[in-house]
Amino acid sequence: MKNFFKILLLTHFLFVVSLSSNAAEKVEYLKTDWTFKGLFGKFDRGSLQRGYQVYTEVCAACHSMKYVSYRNLAEKGGPEFSVEQAKAIAASFEVKDGPNADGEMFTRPGKLSDKFVMPYENVKAAQAANGGAYPPDMSVLVKARGGGANYIYSLLQGYEDPPIGITLDEGVHYNKYMYGNKIKMANPLSDGLIEYADGTTASVEQMSKDVTTFLTWAAEPHLEARHRMGFKAVVYLIILTILVYFSMKRIWSRIETEV
């Protein structure tokens, strides 16, 4: 009996600690009007293209997107660059290929079939260049993080001076939306950091929204097709329900007549 009460008290203690921990970690993320949310949600093409520009000019220096190919940039449901634009984008990067007839590796302009060029040769090289931290691949980052698009959007705008009493190690930054509030990535965005090709003002908020939209597409490239399929399924079920209702009504009316 004595052991039973010990176990009961320990279980209660762990339960309370767990609840306190969850309450402390729960943060209200920033929200914005995502065009891709909801049953009829679609990606904003302009935002996708601007988001690719932010990724290329800011994020790609450290973060890879190893599951995305240059041809995806021209596919329906994505940024929908023209095929010629996608080819030009791919050709602007040098890709390591080979071996050639002499058994040597060589570099060539990128092609549509190539995956996005990696910023580092391997994981160790990435860690060495970033103080031991490995910049995560961004291909499915939105799906891999709790909070999804809102989390990424908030994180990019969450850098601020640490509260009084909190000290940070060298190379560590305070971010109120980061798990544990400590992050090794320095604030990557600042107003006017890039010049958008379409003339949109490149505020931190705008760049955060655009690159998050792009990363959401990368993680869910078939989102629009899935939404269309879901809408058709709902319409089909409604029609089927109506037909079943009238069929049953007709069947029961015959039974009542016979009685």
Image (cartoon, helix red, strand yellow):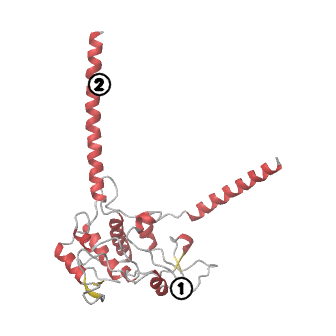
Q: Which residue is mark 1?
A: 171
Q: Is residue 234 above or below residue 97?
A: above
Rendering coords of residue 42 (x, y %): 28, 60
Q: Is residue 108 left or right of residue 176?
A: left
Rendering coords of residue 126 (x, y %): 45, 83
Where, quadrant-wise, is the C terminus in this rendering? top left
Image point 26% across, 41% down: which residue? 236
Q: Quadrant of residue 50?
A: bottom left
Residue found at the very far front of the displayed protein: 102
Nearer to us in this view, 227 or 89? 89
In the drawing, what numbered circle is on residue 248?
2
User: Disc 2 on helix, strand or loop?
Assistant: helix
User: Disc 1 on helix, strand or loop?
Assistant: loop
Residue neighbourhood size for the residue with mark 2, other residues' Cα within 10 Å, grouped as few (<14), some (14–19), many (≥20):
few
Q: What distance separates the C-alpha of mark 2 from that of mark 1?
A: 70 Å
Nearer to us in this view, 108 or 176? 108
Badge 2 amino acid:
Met
Q: Is residue 23 left or right of residue 197?
A: right
Q: Name which of mark 2 and mark 1 comes first in the sequence.
A: 1
Q: Are marks 2 and 1 in contact (CB under 8 Å)?
A: no
Badge 1 amino acid:
Gly
Q: Quadrant of residue 32?
A: bottom left
Q: Is residue 30 left or right of residue 10?
A: left
